[in-house]
Image: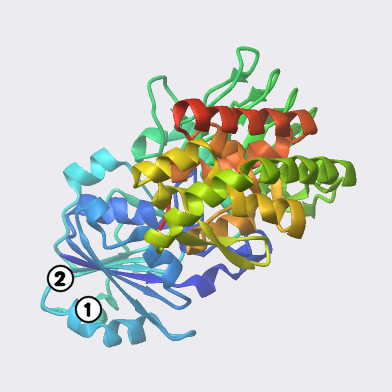
Amino acid sequence: MRCLIFARSSEAEWLKEYFPDVDPFLLKIVNKPLLEYILDIVTLIGISEIRIVSDSSIKEIEHSIGDGSKWGTSISYTLAKPGDSLKNVYLKNYSFCKENNLLIWNGFFFAKYDRNEVKNQVYFSDPFYCGKNKRLIYIPQGQNLNSIKDEKPKDDCCITVYDINSIVDYYQLSMDILTNCNRNYVLPGYTSDKDTFLGINLVYPHSCELHAPIIIGNNCRFQKQTLIGPNSIIGNNVIIDENTCVNDSIVYDNTYIGRDLDLVRKIVYKGNLISGVSGESIHITDNILVSQVELGIVTSYLNRFVQRTIALCMVLIQFIPWLLLFVPFSIFHHHLRTERLLNRNMKTARFPDSSKIARFWWGRLMIRLSLDKFEHLLNASFRARLYLIGNTLFSNTVQHRKLIKDLPVYNPGVFSLSESVASANPEVELFYELEYIDKISTMFNLKILFSVLFGRLIKGLGTKPEATK
């Protein structure tokens, strides 16, 4: 059997008001993209070949889903013209649709199901459709789309169509899945206790309370006296500050929630606070959310002067060793540089790459002495294009460009928090950048600096490979 998924984004224009930069079929429902729910159910039915047809850009979907190997299927992609009807899409993909039993997923909706019932009970024979707008259509081999014209809707196939026509529908669906039927689906996270799903790298003190039903993504940090749940959906890379309560709410990825707040029946997406009951949305203009974190010490003149002074002292100390060790090394070993992103405007410069230098024993010696950072220090002390301590100086990749756009501030430094802990996991990159922005101070900067220098000198840290090429 094959499946044709018509990912008709034009049906979800209302989403742009709330999630302007999210493809509707990648919209997360209980921390999982809608399209992944679709792929789960069609593979449970036994479908081995899938074609996804989108009426908008297909690149983001293809990048997120891949070739289907995660689901044990083969997935191909193609585009439809804006305004194309289902019949037009069917005819344009007729070579894929003919001579096989075919299931058509038609448009933007959610299918409610129990994975155990679908796996054990679903069997299709006659043509049928589900939903008043013919959302789910089955066409047996040898027949075509016209075969379902006079058929009645099928009500006994263990699948219920749920149309998502508003932000309130989205909120109610999310809460229903979390509180009433979270075992019906494969949800992300580790689960041992009932109604509790936890991601990796979750950090919280004993004074923090977690109340089920709850689902928490990866790389989250909750501060003391926080109360999370019941009925809370927390995305990836979320920081929730002291004495804050979040219940009956959805907090999207890459968000900082300030201290002393009560979030009840809300959806938080970047700088927007949305009511799950009425759908009303307000844009927060203070530092409640991460997108509005004050620059504070990052832009203070005193901090900048202190950093440039220390950087200049380090340049003077390193100058002779750099001439004796690094210059001869760079003559014999070429291609040691990587393009780095200098600011949110994506301006770049090429700097020595520690991961490439570390391939040689001579290079590892220089890394222990931090000589690979000499050109960075020159920029921090004279040209002021870098801070001595700041955000990670990311390589110029598509993933890092997207990550930088999600940050409220991007001021790259010679040394960074992620380097002080020798983090090489690309999944936690954003977490450390948000944590640095949250905790930034002169003392915190000095702690990072001494931690990195000590780690390089004694333990040989700072030689981790690039997380993303």
Distance between mark 1 and mark 2 Cα atoms: 9 Å
Residue 374 image point, x, y percent: 60, 49
* Secondary structure beneath label 2: loop
Q: Is residue 254 visible?
A: no
Residue 211, placed above or below residue 132: above
Q: Residue at x 84, y 45 (%)?
A: 305
- The foreground one among 140 and 460 is 460
Residue 211 image point, x, y percent: 57, 21
- The foreground one among 344 and 236 is 344
Q: Residue at x 67, y 62 (%)?
A: 344
Say few, some or many: other residues with alpha carbon within 10 Å of mark 2 (under 14 / 14 to 19 / 20 or more). Answer: many
Residue 80: which numbered mark, if any? none
Residue highlighted by disc 1: 147
Residue 254 image point, x, y percent: 61, 46
Q: Residue at x 39, y 26 (%)?
A: 191
Q: Amino acid at mark 1?
A: Ser
Residue 187, placed above or below residue 6: above
Asked whether, in this view, residue 237 is left or right of residue 129, the answer is right
Q: Residue at x 75, y 39 (%)?
A: 310
Residue 99, placed above or below residue 292: below
- The foreground one among 45 and 436 is 436
- The foreground one among 137 and 5 is 5
Q: Amino acid at mark 2?
A: Pro
Asked whether, in this view, residue 241 is left or right of residue 329, the answer is right
Choose mark 1 or mark 2, whichever is in front. 2
Q: Is residue 314 visible?
A: yes
Asked if labels 2 and 1 touch by Cβ distance under 8 angstroms, the answer is yes
Q: Quadrant of the N terminus?
A: bottom left
Residue 263 image point, x, y percent: 73, 35
Asked whether, in this view, residue 406 is left or right of residue 439, the answer is left
Residue highlighted by disc 2: 140
* Secondary structure beneath label 1: helix
